[in-house]
Image (cartoon, coloured by chain):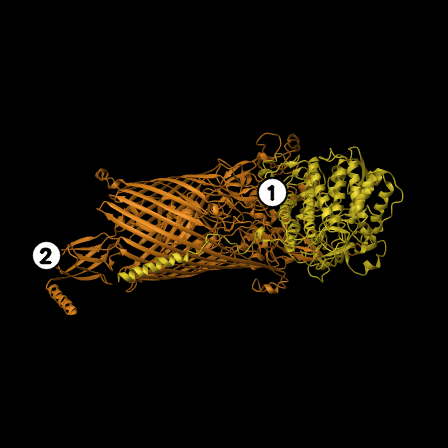
Amino acid sequence: MKKLSLLLVVLLASLQLSAQTQLKGTVLDGSMNDEPMIGASVIVKGTSAGGVTDLDGNFSITVPKGHNQIVVSCVGYKSETVNISGKTFVKVILKEDAALMDEVVVIGYGSMKKSDLSGALSQLKGEDLMKGGAIDVAHGMQGKIAGVQIQQSDGAPGGGMSIVVRGTNSFSTSSQPLYIVDGVPFDSGSMPSNGATQTEQGSNPLSMLNPHDIENIEVLKDASATAIYGSRGANGVVIITTKRGKSGKPKVEFSGSWGWSKITKQIDMLDPVTYAQYINEQTLNDIVYNGSRSTTLPYPGTWGYQAYTDGHLNYNTGKYTGKPEDFANPGWYYDEYGNATEIGVANWQDEIFQTASQQDYNLSVSGGSNEGYYSFSGNYTKQTGTIKNSGYERYSLRANIARHITDWLEIGTNTSFTNSTTDFANTLSYNTGVVRSALLFPPTYGPNMDTTTADNLNWLAANPAAYVRSAVDHLESINYFSSSFAEIKFTPWLKFRQNLGLSYNDSHRGSYYDRHTQEGKSPINGLASRSSNKWKGLTAESIVTFEKTFNNIHSLNVMGAFTFEKGKWENEAVKASNFPDDLTLYYDLSRATNQATLDNNDGTGNRGEQRLASFLGRVNYTLKDRYLLTASIRSDGSSKFTTKNKWATFLSAALAWRASEEKFIKDLNIFSNLKLRVSYGETGNQGIGSYRTLPMLSTANYPFGGTVTSGSASVNWRGPVDDGLKWETTAQWNAGIDFGWFDNRLTLTVDYYYKNTRDLLQNVKIPTSTGFSNMLTNSGRVTNEGLEIAINATPINSKDWHWDINANISFNKNTIHELEGDQYATTLWYGADDVFIQRNGCPIGAIFGYVEDGFYDNEAEVMADPKLGAGGTAKVGEIKYRDMNGDGVINESDRVIIGDTNPKFVYGLTNNIRWKDLSLSFMFQGSQGNDIFNGNLQDIKMGNVGNITRDAYEGRWTASNYENARWPMATGGYERTFLISDRYVENASYLRLKNITLSYNWHRPIKNIENIQFSFGATNVFTITNYSWYDPDVNAFGSDSSRRGVDIYSYPISRTYTLGLNFTF
Amino acid sequence: MKLTKYIFSAAIILSGVLLTSCNNWLEEKPESFIGPESVGDSEAAASRWVAGVYSNWLDDMFRWSNFPRVLELDADYISGPDWLFGNLGAGNFQGDDTCNSLWSGCYNLINDANTAIRYVSAMSSISDAVKNNALGELYFQKAFAYFLLVRAYGAIPYFESDVASGVEYYQPRMAVADVYGKITDLLTQAAGMMYKNTDSGFNTGHVSAGSAAGLLAKVYATMASGAMPADTEIQIRTGEPFTGTTYKDAEGNETFKEFRSPTPETFNKTVVAGHESMNAQELYEKAAEWAKKVIDGEYGSYELSSYDNLWKKSNRDASEFMWAVRSNNGDQVYCTHIHTYYSGYKASASSEFIESGGWVGCTNNWYELFDSQDYRITKGVRHTWRYYYQESYDGCFYYPLSWKVRITGSDLTNTYVQEPDPEYAATGYNYQYNQSSECLAFTTKYNDVEDEATDYADSQWPFLRYADVLLIYAEAENELGNSTEAMTYLNQVRQRSNATLMTTYQGKMKMRSAILEERAKEFACEGDRRWDLIRWGVYLDAMNAIGGRDEANIVKTRETRHLLYPIPTVEMNVNKAITENNPGWN
């Protein structure tokens, strides 16, 4: 019966409808060259009748009598109201709504309208990220966001990146922001070390993400935005949202790019002839100035013969040692007895560098409907390095799927799998490595020199050509990351969401240094290392959100959540050496005579766990769309601290006023947006390792009577334990103002902040006489004060022409307070102690050392100078250090601050210009006022067989060139000590045309292809800088904030040209 | 519908809560390491604490070859290549980290010893004998580390207990005499607590009661010699390496510079800083007393090994080695590089060629101190050896230069004058000598190892030998005026090496000098010479008598500041309780 009546109603209704006017039409996308618009809604004004456009943009609706207007709308477009009286067919073109497009931003544990935002947050869209053709996320972000300083470790493919949001808060804990991908913290664990050699190479967790997959990146900067992340929010939060399918017909997109790179510059080292002259000069100087008893020149140009036992020379054993001029004519030299010697030369940099290539392919299929959405994508990237034998390869797959199961339940998952492979060249290594070798190795040998001679020089550096031929350092990482959710709508204003994040990262690194490298030379006879790292993360978040507007003026959004996170890691590393041959590399360690040594100093075989539990909540209250209040609270409990300090609570509050909503401002008719914001909040940093509050004993064995006996002793590097360790807390004030003019075609955002970080977790140096050198404790305070300005302008926006400009500039001032005494950052490397001082009133990154004062030019000057302290006895031609405190001796108390690695400001400027289908985009980026500690110069000793720069040679002290001397006299001995002085500090300000891209869009070239885009781009086009080494954008110690701005045999950056092709179906 | 909604929601929320509701889940439980509380209370636990302290010698001190360099390189009779000797060996003590390793290594050991003492003292389930022996060994190790420190740095911070027990981190320098007081206290206690080497509980490789007694004798002698009055004379055979004359071959090319034989020079000693308040006579009495106790077997049984056995690897546990650091062949962590530095390693076990190493040797001045029949040069110095690069032309090095005629048949002007000795002629090698660091008097002490083709060979480092106790006894008796006793024990050591015995006592000064010289010969390449010169207050005279550079072109000129090592910069920068570095250092 019931069924029957229902049928009747339907029939009646259809009869009724059929009696009314039928309207057909097409909706076109004004922003996409009038392509058909799929899924636009068409509603008869004043009724609920209407429909949705189909795949071809067509609709067909029935218009009830008495209605003659329809409203056509689509998310992100301006709605159009169309008069249809008397029409049966209409064509509607929708235009993008610039004001609405940016509306929603992702914040911690939710999202909100941008206009309701009261904190400081910057958004970068996926398409802007991809401009310039970056193949990893961090490079794509560089220079594009105010207040975010992104530095690469060096130019290695797949190399490390460090990201600092609003200045460095801390010396010794991580200064890297928290990464949230699709709502879940993203951590890939640490990179396995290369056990066979020492290097500072780091990796970058973001390299595990395919940048093509990214929809938006939000960087939360002030405490109002980050406090919801509590104990991990102090360094800022980077929220990454991956692409979802959009309603409409399936979209298929393929893009490919191909590129070529070359290093941007070579270091000008001495040519073979000058080099040989320089080496001879060392010996001559030694005889004249240093009382050397030597009588022969290293490059004499003579034949030498072995003597028979009776003292007569054997004329069959002739060997020629060339004179400097001979190296201008390399080749075979003969004597009258028929002996031959080859004089070889090489430019070692030419031997290790090459023209590199890169390719990147991406395919994605996406779509969606009211029922849900899907998006599948795959990426393949391959880069060869500009140093031979290095490179990077990545492939990844992603599936983002969500479905409305019922009207109250939606479930979905974002899952990605990434495999990346990095072949490292040994760079960023102070004592071995390929770049070091290429620079220092004597050019008076040929690339194919006899290996025993090469091995003979191995103490200095390996034969660079042999190095790039044979050294292997291979990292393979697998990353699985998934963020899944179930969302239940209890009522329209109350919902519950359960997130579940799973991540798994497995990295394996293997390296092999054969017998022609410094690491593996005899008697090591091949050094292999294998290490692996496993990271498993689990995040569960239960979030309740209440959202309701009362009386149209009170809008309330309340969120409460309980979260739980667990990370587990496991790593191991083994080393083996003494292989019978170099054939099996690191693949079979059992072939080694010295098998699989576990090196307890490297923390081999290690597993552990960290856990975090949190309760959090936030209230957003908006009154009359113009008075905004946000307040948040988070309580974090961490396994890293003892019961004394396990739990900490972080609060924040923010107020904003959308003045542009006020009538008196509206009446001015000047501002399309005007918002004032102020916030205060506290965030924490718990960026220390697990178990740091527990004392640790290491294995310390001893072979009594030749039998190894187990022993235990303290771990010296760890220092004594402070069980009162607690969170670092950052209190931050932020005041900001957002302007919009001309319908938001010109916007300006200015933010001022002041951050005060107290209870710094730091490795305080303690006297080495305690048996330890440092202790992890809370001490001192750091403040950061800064200003960020971001401007977006669209000066031209017509049908044929479009020009927009994004510019940002950030200033930050960092100051240390309340330290008990001066502290020093960890030694950079052997011979570079105490380079970075931590002193009250100075910034983190202040360089400390001696000031030079010319040279001792003659004996009289030596005699006149009583300051013969540091570096031994003063001598003619040696560096004079300045007696800063005037006490008559040169000693440690004469050291002063000689540099600062913090920039005065960093900036970026992007221009996008379009004429019809042709677009040009280019970006300038730079840094001003920062110094670099150029550690490369420390190997210019002017005193051994290592090659030196032409600059050092031309500036060396000689009896005739003492007035212009910049480097001491060339000598052969080892007695000279260079102190850490201003010699090594260089200004690293730079301005760079980071990238430029020209592209052409070809719409509908053939049926079924919507668009083809051709592009040609170049990155690192030019750099204006006074920095003498490869590149000023270098940071050898990666995320170590206490040692920022060091250059040590970095991988040079390269200029890359790319061709891109993009198909959309 | 509604019902499912709520059931479903409840299920999800509940699962979230269950997931996280296990007890104590914010507590840390280490999985891959242990803390001190986990070591336990047992004999095995005590042994682990003790081994952990000894382990410091290997990892870090010897492992990175800062040891024995830091003890050895800065002395008059030692030399080597300039890259090795350029800093510490040339007086540039702050040029590299070698000096600092003595500081950090010893202090690391001291803190570990203090920790171990705390935990072993608290043990209740081990016998007193075991406990006392363990504690005695720990006292010994701690005392020895302080002895090395106080000799090198003078006044130094002294830690009664480990830092985890709450002791002040910033310790000021304790006066030299007080540090010595602590050292002698510790050693006196240790001597009474440890097993004798004849006890059943004694394990080879460990120090024993006799080690403590013997070291105590050496410590007292060190204190005493430093305190001897400033006008005390001492004679050292030394001088510039070359005469200035050069030999030339028939064509007028220079062949060799003429070595100058060392000549006896008499120096007036200075009182070692910090020893002013000490009473040399009393201290020598104590030195003699403790040495005699060892000699008389009161603390175990000790004897000199025969020369031929002395440096054999099978002899490492002989009673003569009262305290030596042992390493394990091929081990890359608990290792030494002694064999590499003094002997050089080969490319393979069957190879006769040295692949690398064999850098540190003694100078001509040292070699010429010996009687020609003394085993310590006939057997104790390497006479022919070959480097890998000599293979292509059948080259071979020899030592000394004075053997040129015997080996090659030619004299110093390269004129062929006689048939070479048949044993050398038979090899067909092209024998070479050059006056650089390539041809020095290289010791054979560390040659006998399990595997000659590794950088991690198992040579042991002799910190204290019975011969040392005998010579200390002789020295003390001489200063106390007992000439016969002094001569008897000096001759015990000389006799073992086939040296001509001393028959007539030529006075205190000559005897004092003879004993010091005997020590230079007996303990060459054992890291002893610098410290003998320092404690006798003749270091500067001995070094500067070389006249600048030695035959391998190493700078030997020294100034007052070289009497003490500089306190490491890291300590100076951080330790608020130390305001001044040693004189001349910063």
Q: Chain of mark 1?
A: A
Q: Chain of mark 2?
A: A
Q: Which residue is mark 1?
A: A768
Let me know if residue B261 appears in the view.
no
**What tint does the image give chain B?**
yellow
**Residue B233, position as x, y percentages in the image:** 81, 35
Neighbour tally class for label 1: few under 14, some 14-19, many 20 plus, Cα within 10 Å: many
Residue toward you, A729 or A528: A729
Count of all numbered marks drawn on residues in the image:
2
Q: Secondary structure at mark 1?
A: helix
> Looking at the image, is A866 positioned above or below residue A648?
above
Classify residue B134 as left or right of residue A732. Answer: right
Q: Which residue is mark 2?
A: A66
Q: Amino acid at mark 1?
A: Thr
> Looking at the image, is A484 positioned above or below residue A857?
below
Q: Amino acid at mark 2?
A: Gly
